[in-house]
Image (spheres, rainbow, N blue to C red):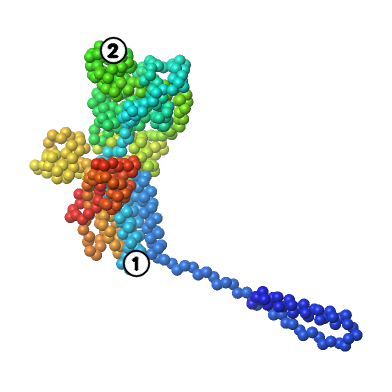
Protein backbone atom coordinates (compact mmCIF):
# COMPACT_ATOMS: atom_id res chain seq x y z
CA UNK A 1 0.00 0.00 0.00
CA UNK A 2 1.36 3.43 -0.91
CA UNK A 3 2.25 5.74 2.00
CA UNK A 4 0.35 8.88 2.30
CA UNK A 5 2.27 12.18 2.14
CA UNK A 6 1.86 12.59 5.89
CA UNK A 7 3.29 9.07 6.62
CA UNK A 8 6.23 9.73 4.34
CA UNK A 9 7.11 12.91 6.18
CA UNK A 10 6.89 11.10 9.54
CA UNK A 11 9.16 8.30 8.33
CA UNK A 12 11.81 10.80 7.28
CA UNK A 13 11.63 12.49 10.67
CA UNK A 14 12.05 9.15 12.48
CA UNK A 15 15.08 8.25 10.35
CA UNK A 16 16.68 11.62 10.99
CA UNK A 17 16.28 11.21 14.75
CA UNK A 18 17.89 7.76 14.65
CA UNK A 19 20.91 9.01 12.70
CA UNK A 20 21.36 11.96 15.04
CA UNK A 21 21.42 9.67 18.13
CA UNK A 22 23.99 7.35 16.59
CA UNK A 23 26.20 10.30 15.67
CA UNK A 24 26.21 11.68 19.24
CA UNK A 25 27.16 8.29 20.70
CA UNK A 26 30.14 8.00 18.37
CA UNK A 27 31.55 11.46 19.39
CA UNK A 28 31.21 10.80 23.18
CA UNK A 29 33.59 7.80 23.48
CA UNK A 30 34.03 8.11 27.28
CA UNK A 31 30.46 7.87 27.95
CA UNK A 32 29.12 4.57 29.06
CA UNK A 33 27.89 2.40 26.28
CA UNK A 34 24.51 3.51 25.31
CA UNK A 35 21.71 1.21 24.58
CA UNK A 36 21.28 0.64 20.91
CA UNK A 37 18.65 2.90 19.36
CA UNK A 38 15.17 1.67 19.18
CA UNK A 39 14.84 0.18 15.78
CA UNK A 40 12.42 2.04 13.52
CA UNK A 41 10.69 -0.30 11.17
CA UNK A 42 9.83 1.14 7.82
CA UNK A 43 7.18 -0.95 6.17
CA UNK A 44 7.82 -1.93 2.56
CA UNK A 45 5.23 -0.50 0.18
CA UNK A 46 2.47 -2.89 -0.63
CA UNK A 47 2.05 -3.89 -4.26
CA UNK A 48 -0.16 -1.48 -6.21
CA UNK A 49 -3.28 -3.05 -7.66
CA UNK A 50 -4.25 -1.78 -11.14
CA UNK A 51 -7.38 0.35 -11.41
CA UNK A 52 -10.48 -1.55 -12.38
CA UNK A 53 -10.79 -1.83 -16.16
CA UNK A 54 -13.53 0.28 -17.79
CA UNK A 55 -16.45 -1.92 -18.60
CA UNK A 56 -17.46 -2.06 -22.28
CA UNK A 57 -20.85 -0.44 -22.86
CA UNK A 58 -23.65 -2.89 -23.04
CA UNK A 59 -24.65 -3.60 -26.65
CA UNK A 60 -27.62 -1.58 -27.89
CA UNK A 61 -29.31 -3.69 -30.57
CA UNK A 62 -31.92 -1.03 -31.25
CA UNK A 63 -29.31 1.70 -31.73
CA UNK A 64 -27.20 -0.48 -34.00
CA UNK A 65 -30.26 -1.40 -36.06
CA UNK A 66 -31.26 2.24 -36.45
CA UNK A 67 -27.70 3.21 -37.44
CA UNK A 68 -27.58 0.47 -40.10
CA UNK A 69 -30.96 1.50 -41.49
CA UNK A 70 -29.90 5.16 -41.54
CA UNK A 71 -26.75 4.34 -43.50
CA UNK A 72 -28.80 2.64 -46.22
CA UNK A 73 -31.22 5.56 -46.32
CA UNK A 74 -28.43 8.14 -46.64
CA UNK A 75 -26.84 6.11 -49.44
CA UNK A 76 -30.22 6.12 -51.18
CA UNK A 77 -30.38 9.89 -50.82
CA UNK A 78 -27.01 10.27 -52.50
CA UNK A 79 -28.04 7.98 -55.36
CA UNK A 80 -31.29 9.89 -55.81
CA UNK A 81 -29.41 13.19 -56.05
CA UNK A 82 -27.45 11.66 -58.93
CA UNK A 83 -30.67 10.61 -60.64
CA UNK A 84 -29.99 6.90 -60.08
CA UNK A 85 -33.52 5.70 -59.37
CA UNK A 86 -32.82 1.98 -59.30
CA UNK A 87 -29.91 2.27 -56.87
CA UNK A 88 -31.89 4.73 -54.74
CA UNK A 89 -34.90 2.41 -54.58
CA UNK A 90 -32.66 -0.52 -53.66
CA UNK A 91 -31.11 1.41 -50.78
CA UNK A 92 -34.47 2.74 -49.56
CA UNK A 93 -35.76 -0.83 -49.74
CA UNK A 94 -32.84 -2.08 -47.72
CA UNK A 95 -33.25 0.67 -45.11
CA UNK A 96 -36.74 -0.69 -44.42
CA UNK A 97 -35.89 -4.36 -44.87
CA UNK A 98 -33.26 -4.38 -42.13
CA UNK A 99 -35.95 -3.08 -39.78
CA UNK A 100 -38.49 -5.67 -40.86
CA UNK A 101 -36.01 -8.54 -40.72
CA UNK A 102 -34.84 -7.70 -37.21
CA UNK A 103 -36.16 -9.75 -34.28
CA UNK A 104 -36.89 -6.45 -32.55
CA UNK A 105 -40.57 -5.70 -32.81
CA UNK A 106 -41.79 -2.17 -33.23
CA UNK A 107 -44.30 -2.60 -30.46
CA UNK A 108 -41.69 -3.60 -27.90
CA UNK A 109 -39.01 -1.11 -28.95
CA UNK A 110 -40.48 2.42 -29.23
CA UNK A 111 -37.23 3.85 -30.67
CA UNK A 112 -37.32 1.38 -33.58
CA UNK A 113 -40.96 2.09 -34.29
CA UNK A 114 -40.34 5.85 -34.19
CA UNK A 115 -37.40 5.52 -36.59
CA UNK A 116 -39.39 3.30 -38.96
CA UNK A 117 -42.33 5.72 -39.05
CA UNK A 118 -40.05 8.68 -39.67
CA UNK A 119 -38.16 6.76 -42.38
CA UNK A 120 -41.31 5.88 -44.31
CA UNK A 121 -42.48 9.50 -44.10
CA UNK A 122 -39.18 10.74 -45.51
CA UNK A 123 -39.24 8.21 -48.34
CA UNK A 124 -42.85 9.20 -49.02
CA UNK A 125 -41.74 12.82 -49.37
CA UNK A 126 -39.29 11.74 -52.05
CA UNK A 127 -42.11 9.84 -53.74
CA UNK A 128 -44.33 12.92 -53.90
CA UNK A 129 -41.47 14.92 -55.39
CA UNK A 130 -40.93 12.18 -57.95
CA UNK A 131 -44.65 12.18 -58.79
CA UNK A 132 -44.52 15.92 -59.36
CA UNK A 133 -41.41 15.52 -61.48
CA UNK A 134 -42.94 12.72 -63.49
CA UNK A 135 -41.58 9.43 -64.70
CA UNK A 136 -40.27 10.00 -68.17
CA UNK A 137 -42.93 12.44 -69.32
CA UNK A 138 -42.43 15.58 -67.25
CA UNK A 139 -40.72 18.21 -69.38
CA UNK A 140 -37.24 19.07 -68.26
CA UNK A 141 -36.59 22.31 -66.39
CA UNK A 142 -35.83 25.28 -68.65
CA UNK A 143 -34.05 28.57 -67.98
CA UNK A 144 -35.49 32.02 -68.75
CA UNK A 145 -34.09 33.57 -71.93
CA UNK A 146 -31.63 36.37 -71.25
CA UNK A 147 -32.99 38.64 -73.97
CA UNK A 148 -36.15 39.21 -71.93
CA UNK A 149 -34.10 40.40 -68.96
CA UNK A 150 -31.76 42.48 -71.11
CA UNK A 151 -34.60 44.35 -72.74
CA UNK A 152 -36.26 45.03 -69.39
CA UNK A 153 -33.03 46.40 -67.91
CA UNK A 154 -32.15 48.43 -70.99
CA UNK A 155 -35.56 50.08 -70.86
CA UNK A 156 -35.10 51.58 -67.40
CA UNK A 157 -31.43 51.25 -66.45
CA UNK A 158 -29.33 51.79 -69.58
CA UNK A 159 -26.65 54.25 -68.41
CA UNK A 160 -25.07 57.07 -70.36
CA UNK A 161 -21.63 56.12 -71.72
CA UNK A 162 -18.61 57.48 -69.90
CA UNK A 163 -15.71 59.20 -71.61
CA UNK A 164 -13.53 56.13 -70.93
CA UNK A 165 -16.04 53.78 -72.56
CA UNK A 166 -16.44 56.02 -75.58
CA UNK A 167 -12.69 56.19 -76.04
CA UNK A 168 -12.25 52.42 -75.61
CA UNK A 169 -14.95 51.64 -78.20
CA UNK A 170 -13.47 54.14 -80.66
CA UNK A 171 -10.05 52.50 -80.30
CA UNK A 172 -11.53 49.02 -80.77
CA UNK A 173 -13.41 49.99 -83.93
CA UNK A 174 -10.19 51.41 -85.37
CA UNK A 175 -7.91 48.49 -84.52
CA UNK A 176 -10.21 45.40 -84.70
CA UNK A 177 -11.52 44.33 -88.08
CA UNK A 178 -15.25 43.54 -87.97
CA UNK A 179 -17.05 41.79 -90.78
CA UNK A 180 -20.31 43.68 -90.23
CA UNK A 181 -20.65 47.45 -89.95
CA UNK A 182 -20.71 48.77 -86.35
CA UNK A 183 -21.43 52.50 -86.07
CA UNK A 184 -20.09 54.55 -83.16
CA UNK A 185 -23.44 55.97 -82.06
CA UNK A 186 -25.03 56.78 -78.71
CA UNK A 187 -27.20 53.67 -78.58
CA UNK A 188 -24.33 51.24 -79.17
CA UNK A 189 -22.16 53.09 -76.63
CA UNK A 190 -24.98 53.00 -74.11
CA UNK A 191 -25.21 49.21 -74.28
CA UNK A 192 -21.43 48.77 -74.15
CA UNK A 193 -21.54 50.79 -70.94
CA UNK A 194 -24.32 48.52 -69.65
CA UNK A 195 -22.36 45.35 -70.48
CA UNK A 196 -19.17 46.60 -68.82
CA UNK A 197 -20.99 47.85 -65.73
CA UNK A 198 -24.43 46.81 -64.52
CA UNK A 199 -24.52 43.64 -66.67
CA UNK A 200 -20.83 42.77 -66.42
CA UNK A 201 -21.39 39.52 -64.51
CA UNK A 202 -24.04 38.41 -67.00
CA UNK A 203 -21.70 38.96 -69.96
CA UNK A 204 -18.85 37.20 -68.15
CA UNK A 205 -21.01 34.13 -67.56
CA UNK A 206 -22.25 34.10 -71.15
CA UNK A 207 -18.77 34.44 -72.63
CA UNK A 208 -17.42 31.77 -70.29
CA UNK A 209 -20.18 29.43 -71.46
CA UNK A 210 -19.60 30.38 -75.11
CA UNK A 211 -16.20 28.66 -75.06
CA UNK A 212 -18.09 25.37 -75.35
CA UNK A 213 -20.11 26.36 -78.43
CA UNK A 214 -18.36 29.27 -80.18
CA UNK A 215 -15.86 27.17 -82.19
CA UNK A 216 -18.71 25.07 -83.56
CA UNK A 217 -20.77 28.16 -84.45
CA UNK A 218 -17.83 29.79 -86.19
CA UNK A 219 -17.12 26.62 -88.17
CA UNK A 220 -20.73 26.48 -89.40
CA UNK A 221 -20.80 30.19 -90.29
CA UNK A 222 -17.43 29.98 -92.02
CA UNK A 223 -18.68 27.08 -94.14
CA UNK A 224 -21.86 29.04 -95.01
CA UNK A 225 -19.95 32.24 -95.85
CA UNK A 226 -21.54 34.26 -93.04
CA UNK A 227 -19.84 37.03 -91.01
CA UNK A 228 -18.15 35.48 -87.98
CA UNK A 229 -19.20 38.45 -85.83
CA UNK A 230 -22.73 37.04 -85.98
CA UNK A 231 -21.54 34.06 -83.94
CA UNK A 232 -22.05 36.28 -80.87
CA UNK A 233 -25.80 36.73 -81.43
CA UNK A 234 -26.55 33.90 -78.92
CA UNK A 235 -24.78 35.94 -76.24
CA UNK A 236 -27.71 38.37 -76.35
CA UNK A 237 -30.40 35.83 -77.18
CA UNK A 238 -29.66 33.16 -74.56
CA UNK A 239 -26.19 33.65 -73.03
CA UNK A 240 -25.39 30.40 -74.90
CA UNK A 241 -27.85 28.35 -72.81
CA UNK A 242 -29.45 25.51 -74.82
CA UNK A 243 -32.21 25.30 -72.20
CA UNK A 244 -33.23 28.96 -72.53
CA UNK A 245 -36.96 29.56 -73.06
CA UNK A 246 -38.39 33.04 -73.61
CA UNK A 247 -41.78 34.35 -72.53
CA UNK A 248 -42.83 34.10 -76.17
CA UNK A 249 -41.79 30.38 -76.14
CA UNK A 250 -38.68 30.85 -78.28
CA UNK A 251 -36.11 28.22 -77.36
CA UNK A 252 -32.43 27.28 -77.51
CA UNK A 253 -29.25 29.28 -77.95
CA UNK A 254 -30.68 30.88 -81.11
CA UNK A 255 -34.17 31.40 -79.61
CA UNK A 256 -36.16 30.03 -82.54
CA UNK A 257 -39.92 30.34 -82.50
CA UNK A 258 -41.69 27.08 -83.31
CA UNK A 259 -42.85 28.09 -86.79
CA UNK A 260 -39.51 29.54 -87.87
CA UNK A 261 -37.74 26.45 -86.57
CA UNK A 262 -39.97 24.13 -88.63
CA UNK A 263 -39.40 26.29 -91.73
CA UNK A 264 -35.66 25.87 -91.28
CA UNK A 265 -35.63 22.10 -90.79
CA UNK A 266 -35.76 21.67 -87.02
CA UNK A 267 -37.94 18.83 -85.72
CA UNK A 268 -40.25 19.12 -82.74
CA UNK A 269 -42.59 16.63 -81.12
CA UNK A 270 -43.58 15.39 -77.68
CA UNK A 271 -40.16 13.88 -77.06
CA UNK A 272 -37.60 16.10 -78.77
CA UNK A 273 -37.11 19.76 -79.65
CA UNK A 274 -34.15 20.32 -81.96
CA UNK A 275 -34.20 24.05 -81.22
CA UNK A 276 -32.32 23.11 -78.04
CA UNK A 277 -29.64 21.08 -79.87
CA UNK A 278 -26.81 23.60 -80.44
CA UNK A 279 -25.36 22.16 -83.67
CA UNK A 280 -28.70 21.58 -85.41
CA UNK A 281 -30.02 24.95 -84.27
CA UNK A 282 -26.84 26.71 -85.47
CA UNK A 283 -27.16 25.12 -88.89
CA UNK A 284 -30.78 26.29 -89.04
CA UNK A 285 -29.77 29.79 -87.87
CA UNK A 286 -27.16 30.00 -90.64
CA UNK A 287 -29.81 29.14 -93.24
CA UNK A 288 -32.26 31.66 -91.81
CA UNK A 289 -29.72 34.50 -91.54
CA UNK A 290 -28.66 33.97 -95.14
CA UNK A 291 -32.31 34.14 -96.20
CA UNK A 292 -32.86 37.38 -94.29
CA UNK A 293 -29.67 38.90 -95.67
CA UNK A 294 -30.82 38.22 -99.24
CA UNK A 295 -34.28 39.56 -98.42
CA UNK A 296 -32.80 42.91 -97.33
CA UNK A 297 -30.15 43.20 -100.05
CA UNK A 298 -27.15 42.47 -97.86
CA UNK A 299 -28.04 44.94 -95.07
CA UNK A 300 -27.14 43.09 -91.86
CA UNK A 301 -28.73 45.71 -89.60
CA UNK A 302 -32.13 45.18 -91.23
CA UNK A 303 -31.52 41.42 -91.30
CA UNK A 304 -30.82 41.40 -87.54
CA UNK A 305 -33.92 43.53 -86.90
CA UNK A 306 -36.02 41.03 -88.83
CA UNK A 307 -34.38 38.11 -86.95
CA UNK A 308 -35.90 39.64 -83.83
CA UNK A 309 -39.16 41.15 -85.05
CA UNK A 310 -39.84 39.09 -88.16
CA UNK A 311 -39.17 40.06 -91.79
CA UNK A 312 -42.81 40.96 -92.44
CA UNK A 313 -42.87 43.57 -89.68
CA UNK A 314 -39.63 45.17 -90.85
CA UNK A 315 -40.81 45.26 -94.47
CA UNK A 316 -44.09 46.88 -93.44
CA UNK A 317 -42.20 49.47 -91.39
CA UNK A 318 -39.99 50.28 -94.37
CA UNK A 319 -43.02 50.63 -96.62
CA UNK A 320 -44.90 52.88 -94.18
CA UNK A 321 -41.93 55.13 -93.46
CA UNK A 322 -40.32 55.17 -96.88
CA UNK A 323 -36.99 54.49 -95.13
CA UNK A 324 -34.59 51.66 -95.95
CA UNK A 325 -32.02 52.33 -93.20
CA UNK A 326 -32.41 50.66 -89.81
CA UNK A 327 -31.11 53.63 -87.80
CA UNK A 328 -33.57 55.98 -89.47
CA UNK A 329 -36.38 53.54 -88.82
CA UNK A 330 -35.31 53.16 -85.16
CA UNK A 331 -35.11 56.93 -84.67
CA UNK A 332 -38.91 57.01 -84.48
CA UNK A 333 -41.19 55.05 -82.16
CA UNK A 334 -43.86 54.82 -84.87
CA UNK A 335 -42.55 51.99 -87.00
CA UNK A 336 -40.76 49.33 -84.94
CA UNK A 337 -41.43 48.08 -81.40
CA UNK A 338 -38.93 49.06 -78.73
CA UNK A 339 -37.58 45.50 -78.46
CA UNK A 340 -36.56 45.48 -82.12
CA UNK A 341 -35.17 49.03 -81.97
CA UNK A 342 -32.94 48.01 -79.05
CA UNK A 343 -32.09 44.55 -80.35
CA UNK A 344 -29.68 45.59 -83.12
CA UNK A 345 -27.51 47.92 -80.97
CA UNK A 346 -27.55 45.28 -78.21
CA UNK A 347 -26.07 42.70 -80.60
CA UNK A 348 -23.49 45.17 -81.93
CA UNK A 349 -22.46 46.15 -78.38
CA UNK A 350 -22.14 42.46 -77.46
CA UNK A 351 -19.87 41.89 -80.47
CA UNK A 352 -17.62 44.80 -79.42
CA UNK A 353 -17.29 43.57 -75.84
CA UNK A 354 -16.93 39.90 -76.79
CA UNK A 355 -14.13 40.56 -79.28
CA UNK A 356 -12.00 42.35 -76.65
CA UNK A 357 -13.33 41.48 -73.16
CA UNK A 358 -10.16 42.55 -71.28
CA UNK A 359 -10.61 46.08 -72.63
CA UNK A 360 -13.87 46.32 -70.68
CA UNK A 361 -12.69 44.67 -67.47
CA UNK A 362 -14.33 41.30 -68.08
CA UNK A 363 -12.87 38.18 -66.48
CA UNK A 364 -13.64 35.10 -68.58
CA UNK A 365 -13.45 31.68 -66.90
CA UNK A 366 -13.91 29.10 -69.67
CA UNK A 367 -16.19 26.21 -68.74
CA UNK A 368 -15.04 22.63 -69.14
CA UNK A 369 -15.95 21.16 -72.51
CA UNK A 370 -17.45 17.69 -71.88
CA UNK A 371 -16.15 14.83 -73.99
CA UNK A 372 -18.68 12.31 -75.23
CA UNK A 373 -19.34 9.35 -77.48
CA UNK A 374 -22.55 8.16 -79.07
CA UNK A 375 -24.69 5.04 -78.67
CA UNK A 376 -27.50 3.96 -80.99
CA UNK A 377 -30.73 2.97 -79.25
CA UNK A 378 -33.39 0.90 -80.97
CA UNK A 379 -36.00 1.34 -78.21
CA UNK A 380 -36.91 4.06 -75.71
CA UNK A 381 -34.64 4.21 -72.68
CA UNK A 382 -35.02 6.19 -69.45
CA UNK A 383 -32.17 8.70 -69.08
CA UNK A 384 -31.90 7.92 -65.37
CA UNK A 385 -31.06 4.32 -66.16
CA UNK A 386 -28.46 5.46 -68.68
CA UNK A 387 -26.93 7.71 -66.01
CA UNK A 388 -26.83 4.84 -63.55
CA UNK A 389 -25.18 2.52 -66.03
CA UNK A 390 -22.65 5.19 -66.98
CA UNK A 391 -21.95 6.02 -63.33
CA UNK A 392 -22.72 9.71 -63.81
CA UNK A 393 -25.41 12.16 -62.63
CA UNK A 394 -28.51 12.25 -64.81
CA UNK A 395 -27.94 16.00 -65.27
CA UNK A 396 -24.83 15.19 -67.28
CA UNK A 397 -26.80 12.96 -69.66
CA UNK A 398 -29.38 15.73 -70.05
CA UNK A 399 -26.64 18.29 -70.61
CA UNK A 400 -25.16 16.19 -73.42
CA UNK A 401 -28.61 15.70 -75.02
CA UNK A 402 -30.47 19.02 -74.60
CA UNK A 403 -32.91 18.27 -77.44
CA UNK A 404 -34.65 15.65 -75.28
CA UNK A 405 -37.74 17.18 -73.69
CA UNK A 406 -38.56 14.22 -71.46
CA UNK A 407 -36.68 11.83 -69.24
CA UNK A 408 -36.88 9.19 -71.95
CA UNK A 409 -35.67 8.92 -75.53
CA UNK A 410 -38.31 9.04 -78.29
CA UNK A 411 -40.70 6.10 -78.16
CA UNK A 412 -40.79 5.41 -81.89
CA UNK A 413 -37.14 6.08 -82.67
CA UNK A 414 -35.42 2.89 -83.80
CA UNK A 415 -31.94 4.39 -84.28
CA UNK A 416 -31.74 7.24 -81.81
CA UNK A 417 -28.24 8.66 -81.33
CA UNK A 418 -27.70 9.34 -77.62
CA UNK A 419 -24.57 11.07 -76.34
CA UNK A 420 -22.93 9.55 -73.25
CA UNK A 421 -19.71 10.46 -71.40
CA UNK A 422 -16.58 9.31 -73.14
CA UNK A 423 -15.55 5.80 -72.09
CA UNK A 424 -19.06 4.66 -71.10
CA UNK A 425 -20.65 3.66 -74.43
CA UNK A 426 -19.75 -0.03 -74.21
CA UNK A 427 -21.02 -0.28 -70.64
CA UNK A 428 -24.32 1.41 -71.51
CA UNK A 429 -24.89 -0.81 -74.53
CA UNK A 430 -24.11 -3.93 -72.49
CA UNK A 431 -26.80 -2.98 -69.96
CA UNK A 432 -29.27 -2.17 -72.76
CA UNK A 433 -28.69 -5.60 -74.30
CA UNK A 434 -29.09 -7.39 -70.95
CA UNK A 435 -32.23 -5.53 -69.80
CA UNK A 436 -35.77 -6.66 -70.47
CA UNK A 437 -37.43 -4.38 -73.06
CA UNK A 438 -40.12 -3.27 -70.62
CA UNK A 439 -37.45 -2.33 -68.05
CA UNK A 440 -35.64 0.16 -70.29
CA UNK A 441 -38.33 2.82 -69.92
CA UNK A 442 -41.20 2.68 -67.39
CA UNK A 443 -44.11 3.41 -69.71
CA UNK A 444 -47.80 3.15 -68.90
CA UNK A 445 -49.98 1.60 -71.61
CA UNK A 446 -53.71 1.52 -72.24
CA UNK A 447 -55.44 -0.86 -74.64
CA UNK A 448 -58.31 0.87 -76.42
CA UNK A 449 -61.73 -0.68 -75.85
CA UNK A 450 -64.67 -0.59 -78.19
CA UNK A 451 -66.30 2.81 -78.31
CA UNK A 452 -63.44 4.69 -76.67
CA UNK A 453 -62.03 7.91 -78.07
CA UNK A 454 -59.03 10.04 -77.17
CA UNK A 455 -61.36 12.34 -75.25
CA UNK A 456 -63.03 9.57 -73.25
CA UNK A 457 -59.70 7.89 -72.50
CA UNK A 458 -58.11 11.17 -71.38
CA UNK A 459 -61.05 11.86 -69.07
CA UNK A 460 -61.04 8.33 -67.70
CA UNK A 461 -57.30 8.31 -67.02
CA UNK A 462 -57.16 11.99 -65.99
CA UNK A 463 -54.60 13.14 -68.52
CA UNK A 464 -54.69 15.94 -71.07
CA UNK A 465 -56.16 14.93 -74.43
CA UNK A 466 -53.46 17.00 -76.19
CA UNK A 467 -50.72 15.27 -74.20
CA UNK A 468 -52.24 11.86 -74.84
CA UNK A 469 -52.41 12.53 -78.57
CA UNK A 470 -48.91 14.02 -78.89
CA UNK A 471 -47.28 11.28 -76.82
CA UNK A 472 -48.69 8.78 -79.35
CA UNK A 473 -47.86 10.86 -82.46
CA UNK A 474 -51.55 11.61 -83.07
CA UNK A 475 -53.57 14.77 -83.52
CA UNK A 476 -56.25 15.61 -80.97
CA UNK A 477 -58.90 14.76 -83.60
CA UNK A 478 -57.43 11.36 -84.49
CA UNK A 479 -59.65 8.33 -84.11
CA UNK A 480 -58.45 5.23 -82.29
CA UNK A 481 -59.32 1.59 -82.88
CA UNK A 482 -60.29 -1.16 -80.50
CA UNK A 483 -57.19 -3.08 -79.42
CA UNK A 484 -54.83 -0.20 -80.20
CA UNK A 485 -52.20 0.39 -77.48
CA UNK A 486 -51.65 3.93 -76.30
CA UNK A 487 -48.90 5.32 -74.11
CA UNK A 488 -50.34 7.16 -71.13
CA UNK A 489 -48.19 10.21 -70.40
CA UNK A 490 -48.18 10.15 -66.64
CA UNK A 491 -46.16 8.79 -63.75
CA UNK A 492 -46.77 5.34 -62.24
CA UNK A 493 -48.68 5.23 -58.98
CA UNK A 494 -45.65 4.75 -56.74
CA UNK A 495 -42.02 5.39 -57.56
CA UNK A 496 -39.91 5.24 -54.45
CA UNK A 497 -41.95 4.70 -51.34
CA UNK A 498 -43.41 1.47 -50.06
CA UNK A 499 -46.58 3.31 -49.21
CA UNK A 500 -47.52 6.80 -48.12
CA UNK A 501 -48.83 5.49 -44.81
CA UNK A 502 -46.58 4.57 -41.88
CA UNK A 503 -46.99 0.89 -41.02
CA UNK A 504 -45.14 -0.49 -38.03
CA UNK A 505 -42.35 -3.04 -38.47
CA UNK A 506 -43.16 -6.62 -37.63
CA UNK A 507 -40.89 -9.50 -36.77
CA UNK A 508 -41.44 -11.64 -39.88
CA UNK A 509 -38.86 -11.28 -42.62
CA UNK A 510 -40.30 -10.17 -45.94
CA UNK A 511 -39.12 -8.70 -49.21
CA UNK A 512 -40.29 -5.28 -50.33
CA UNK A 513 -40.78 -3.95 -53.82
CA UNK A 514 -40.93 -0.18 -53.65
CA UNK A 515 -42.17 0.15 -57.18
CA UNK A 516 -45.69 -1.07 -56.52
CA UNK A 517 -45.95 -3.05 -53.29
CA UNK A 518 -47.57 -2.37 -49.93
CA UNK A 519 -46.36 -3.50 -46.52
CA UNK A 520 -48.65 -5.95 -44.77
CA UNK A 521 -49.60 -4.96 -41.24
CA UNK A 522 -51.93 -6.52 -38.68
CA UNK A 523 -54.55 -3.97 -39.72
CA UNK A 524 -54.39 -2.94 -43.35
CA UNK A 525 -54.24 0.84 -43.45
CA UNK A 526 -56.22 2.90 -45.91
CA UNK A 527 -54.43 3.59 -49.15
CA UNK A 528 -53.25 7.15 -49.60
CA UNK A 529 -52.56 9.22 -52.67
CA UNK A 530 -50.71 12.39 -53.56
CA UNK A 531 -53.39 15.02 -54.12
CA UNK A 532 -52.52 18.06 -56.20
CA UNK A 533 -54.00 21.38 -55.18
CA UNK A 534 -53.41 25.01 -56.12
CA UNK A 535 -52.77 27.53 -53.35
CA UNK A 536 -53.10 31.27 -53.97
CA UNK A 537 -50.57 33.26 -51.93
CA UNK A 538 -52.11 35.72 -49.47
CA UNK A 539 -50.64 38.80 -47.84
CA UNK A 540 -48.22 37.82 -45.10
CA UNK A 541 -47.63 34.30 -46.46
CA UNK A 542 -44.14 32.84 -46.63
CA UNK A 543 -42.96 29.52 -48.01
CA UNK A 544 -42.34 28.43 -44.44
CA UNK A 545 -45.87 29.27 -43.29
CA UNK A 546 -47.39 27.53 -46.33
CA UNK A 547 -45.18 24.47 -45.80
CA UNK A 548 -46.24 24.34 -42.15
CA UNK A 549 -49.90 24.67 -43.14
CA UNK A 550 -49.73 21.66 -45.47
CA UNK A 551 -47.25 19.67 -43.38
CA UNK A 552 -44.54 19.68 -46.03
CA UNK A 553 -41.18 21.39 -46.48
CA UNK A 554 -40.03 24.61 -48.10
CA UNK A 555 -37.73 22.66 -50.41
CA UNK A 556 -40.61 20.47 -51.60
CA UNK A 557 -42.72 23.52 -52.50
CA UNK A 558 -39.76 25.05 -54.34
CA UNK A 559 -39.21 21.81 -56.26
CA UNK A 560 -42.87 21.41 -57.22
CA UNK A 561 -43.04 25.02 -58.47
CA UNK A 562 -39.48 25.31 -59.85
CA UNK A 563 -38.73 28.25 -57.57
CA UNK A 564 -35.12 29.41 -57.40
CA UNK A 565 -35.54 31.49 -54.27
CA UNK A 566 -37.87 31.82 -51.28
CA UNK A 567 -39.49 34.92 -52.75
CA UNK A 568 -43.25 34.77 -53.44
CA UNK A 569 -45.85 37.46 -54.11
CA UNK A 570 -49.50 38.02 -53.28
CA UNK A 571 -51.78 36.27 -55.77
CA UNK A 572 -49.13 33.82 -56.95
CA UNK A 573 -50.43 30.29 -57.55
CA UNK A 574 -48.43 27.48 -55.99
CA UNK A 575 -48.83 23.77 -56.70
CA UNK A 576 -49.00 21.68 -53.50
CA UNK A 577 -48.94 17.88 -53.32
CA UNK A 578 -50.37 16.45 -50.13
CA UNK A 579 -51.19 12.94 -49.01
CA UNK A 580 -54.60 11.94 -47.69
CA UNK A 581 -56.83 8.92 -47.26
CA UNK A 582 -58.38 7.64 -50.43
CA UNK A 583 -60.01 4.51 -51.67
CA UNK A 584 -57.94 4.30 -54.83
CA UNK A 585 -54.71 5.72 -56.14
CA UNK A 586 -54.61 8.17 -59.01
Q: Mark 2 packing: few (<14 Cα in 10 Å), some, or many (20+)? A: some
Q: Residue at x 12, y 44 (%)?
A: 449
Q: Residue at x 13, y 34 (%)?
A: 477
Q: Residue at x 32, y 65 (%)?
A: 106
Tell me if residue 18 comes above or below residue 514 in the rendering. Answer: below
Residue that extends furthest to the left in the rendered view of this protein? 451
Q: Nearer the viewer, residue 29 or 207?
A: 29
Frontmost of labels 1 and 2 is: 2
| 231 sits left or right of 584 in the view | right
Q: Quadrant of the rendered structure where residue 424 is?
A: top left
The secondary structure type at the circle numbered 2 is loop
Q: Nearer the viewer, residue 509 or 548?
A: 548
Tell me if residue 289 comes above or below residue 536 in the rendering. Answer: above
Q: Residue at x 30, y 62 (%)?
A: 505
Quadrant of the drawing holding the N terminus:
bottom right
According to the image, label 1 marks what residue?
Answer: 109
Residue that extends furthest to the right in the rendered view of this protein? 30
According to the image, label 2 marks what residue?
Answer: 324
Q: Quadrant of the rendered structure where residue 27 is?
A: bottom right
Residue 432 in percent (x, y) is at 32, 42
Marked residue nearer the N-terminal end (1 or 2): 1
Residue 461 seen anywhere in this rendered image of the structure: yes
Q: Nearer the viewer, residue 382 or 341?
A: 341
Residue 228 in percent (x, y) is at 39, 20
Amino acid sequence: MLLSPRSSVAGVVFCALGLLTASCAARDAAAPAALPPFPVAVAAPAPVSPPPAAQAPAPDPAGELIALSTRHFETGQRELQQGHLEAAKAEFNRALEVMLESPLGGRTEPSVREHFDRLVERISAYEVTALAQGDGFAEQTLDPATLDDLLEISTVEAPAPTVETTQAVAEDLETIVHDIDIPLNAKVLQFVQLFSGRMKEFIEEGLSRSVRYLPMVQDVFRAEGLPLDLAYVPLVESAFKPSALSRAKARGIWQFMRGTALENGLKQDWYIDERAEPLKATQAAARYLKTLNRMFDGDWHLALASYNGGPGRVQRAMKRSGRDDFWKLAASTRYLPRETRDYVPLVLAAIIVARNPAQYGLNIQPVEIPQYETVTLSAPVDLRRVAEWAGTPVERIQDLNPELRRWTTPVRATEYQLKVPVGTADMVMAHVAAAEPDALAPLNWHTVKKGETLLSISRKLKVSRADLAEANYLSVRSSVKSGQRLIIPRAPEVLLAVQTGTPAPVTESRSLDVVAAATVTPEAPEQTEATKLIYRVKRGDTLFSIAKLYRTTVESIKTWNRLRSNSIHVGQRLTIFRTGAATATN
